[in-house]
């Protein structure tokens, strides 16, 4: 009997074609990305058990500094390498986009 690699429920929660909940491997890029996504969408202080979890402004409109957001997300998800791009926009529709790239840190050699 072999022990399966640990998995976590995928976020957002969804069912596969077979009717079971989708999962992501623990510690993989998909899990790291969904963790960073969860942190970035959670208002600071919303979780009573972890009041330091989240970001001060989930709309990223007041005092937003990309390097500070990167540092905050990496602090709360230490396995992540985060890059924030705030230069994406659609001037025809008046939309500004924030693109966050995240992935797992490579394990140190040795």
Image: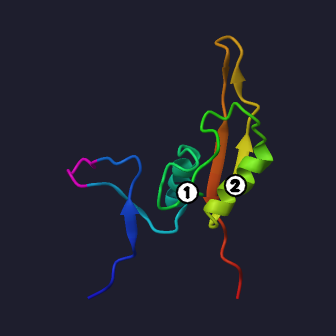
Q: Are marks 2 and 1 in contact (CB under 8 Å)?
A: no
Residue 101 appears at what percent x and percent y? 65, 48
Disc 2 crowd, CA 10 A, few/some/many (<14, 14-19, 20+): some
38 is within the stretch colored magenta:
no
| Mark before the other along the chain sequence, 2 or 1 | 1
Q: Kindly state the secondary structure of the residue where label 2 is placed.
A: helix
Q: Which residue is mark 1?
A: 51
Residue 71 appears at what percent x and percent y? 74, 56
Residue 11 appears at what percent x and percent y? 41, 50
Left or right for 2, reference 48: left
Q: Is residue 27 above or below residue 72?
A: below
Q: Which residue is mark 2?
A: 72
Look at the image and tell me in which quarter the C terminus lies: bottom right
Look at the image and tell me in which quarter the N terminus lies: bottom left
Nearer to us in this view, 5 or 53: 53
- The residue at 31%/86% (across/down) is 2
18 is within the stretch colored magenta:
yes
- Res. 29 image quadrant: bottom right
Left or right for 102, reference 6: right
For the record, the magenta segment spans 15-20
As measured in the structure, the alpha-carbon distance from the residue carrying label 2 to the one carrying label 1 is 14 Å
- The residue at 50%/48% (across/down) is 46
- The residue at 57%/56% (across/down) is 53
Disc 1 crowd, CA 10 A, few/some/many (<14, 14-19, 20+): few
Seen as rendered, the residue at the extreme top is 92
Q: Kindly state the secondary structure of the residue where label 1 is placed.
A: loop
Left or right for 17, reference 81: left
Nearer to us in this view, 61 or 84: 61
């Amino acid at each position: 009997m072999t022990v399966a690699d640990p998995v976590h429920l995928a976020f957002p929660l969804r069912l596969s074609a077979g009717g079971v909940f989708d999962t992501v491997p623990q510690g993989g890029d998909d899990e790291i990305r969904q963790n960073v996504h969860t942190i970035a969408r959670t208002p600071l202080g919303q979780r009573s058990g972890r009041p330091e979890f989240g970001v001060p402004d989930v709309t990223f409109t007041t005092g937003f500094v990309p390097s500070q957001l990167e540092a905050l997300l990496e602090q709360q998800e230490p396995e992540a390498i985060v890059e924030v791009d705030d230069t994406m926009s659609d001037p025809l529709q008046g939309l500004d986009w924030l693109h966050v790239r995240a992935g797992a840190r490579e394990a140190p050699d040795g």
